[in-house]
Image: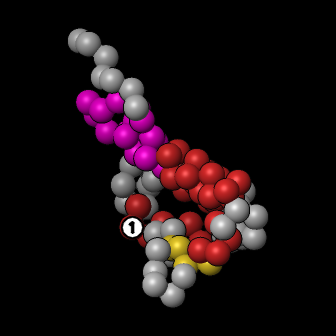
Amino acid sequence: MFTAGSIEIPFIWILRTPPFDEPAVREELRLRINRIEGVEIAEAAITKRPAFPARLLRAESELTKFYDAMEWLLGTARSAQPGTAGVGEPEAAP
């Protein structure tokens, strides 16, 4: 989030990190963020740093969609790391 009131989705910084090195995974994140009313991140932006106005998250329902997308991002990142569990899940015993 920037002081100018925008929220940046830094695809450029995650595109070299599995599983986000796969375009389909970044596309899934883009689609989840685009569920927020008024957000329209272009398909070509999954290798860039698109942003949208933070004011689009004023409604609780839209903020929830943003949180859901970020939880998916974190869960996906964690599940790709060896020896880590999913969001809020303990690691399985050996």
The residue to which callout 1 is attached is: 13
Identified at 43% across, 47% down, the residue is 74
Q: Is residue 42 left or right of residue 12?
A: right
Look at the picture and state if 14 lies above or below 47.
Answer: above
Q: Quadrant of residue 58?
A: bottom right
Closest to the observer: 4 or 44? 4
Q: Is residue 74 left or right of residue 65?
A: left
Closest to the observer: 84 or 71? 71
Q: Is residue 58 left or right of residue 15?
A: right
Q: Residue furthest right?
A: 37
Q: Quadrant of residue 90?
A: top left
Closest to the observer: 51 or 24? 51
Identified at 55% across, 79% down, the residue is 6
Where residue 21 appears, as percent x and y from the top left, is: 44, 55
Q: Is residue 48 visible?
A: no
Is residue 51 one of those drawn in magenta?
A: no
Q: Residue furthest bottom?
A: 4
Task: Write down the region rendered in magenta.
Answer: 73-87
Look at the picture and state if 17 lies above or below 88.
Answer: below
Query: What amino acid is at disc 1?
Result: Trp
| Colouring used for the render | secondary structure
Q: Quadrant of the C terminus?
A: top left
Label 1 sits on a secondary structure element that is: helix
Q: Is residue 83 visible?
A: yes
Identified at 46% across, 69% down, the residue is 10
Where residue 80 appears, as percent x and y from the top left, is: 38, 39
Q: How many marks?
A: 1
Closest to the observer: 23 or 51? 51
Q: Residue furthest top?
A: 94
Dot 1, crowdedness within 10 Å: few (<14), some or many (≥20)?
few
